[in-house]
Amino acid sequence: MIFIPLRFNYCPHCNKKIIFKIEMEDIDSRQYPAPVYIVHKDESCNKLSTFYVDSLLRVSYMELEKKKGGIKTLETIP
Ligand SMILES: [Zn+2]
């Protein structure tokens, strides 16, 4: 299996497509799904949400607000 750290998803605030890069060091792996904060770098959005990922860094679900437990804030790739 080839590990691709790029993730394609949708911003839960504006529903636009987003791309971000996530690696194991971006999450606290003691508990899954693990939260990570994503900032949608977009002129009309720029909002933060919490994405929860599993042990393969696949997004399980997301929350609109900043939930506790995350250790990193990632910005989307333009
Ligand atoms: Zn957005």
Image: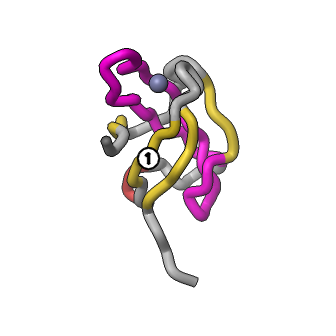
* Image location of residue 24, percent across then percent down: 44, 60
Residue at x 56% of width, y 52% of height: 30
Instruction: Pick whichever, 10 or 5, lies toward us.
Output: 10
Q: Which residues are magenta?
A: 33-59
Q: Is residue 56 above or below residue 38?
A: below
Against 64, residue 18 (above or below) is below
Q: What's the residue at 40%, 39% (across, down)?
A: 71
What colouring does the structure picture have?
A: secondary structure
Q: Amino acid at mark 1?
A: Ile
Q: Is residue 40 magenta?
A: yes
Q: Quadrant of the C terminus?
A: top left
The front one of 67 and 58 is: 58
Q: Position of residue 44 (x, y in %)?
A: 37, 15
The residue depicted at 58 percent of the width and 27 percent of the height is 15
Q: Position of residue 28 (x, y in %)?
A: 48, 48
Q: Which residue is mark 1?
A: 19
The vertical placement of 14 against 24, above or below, is above
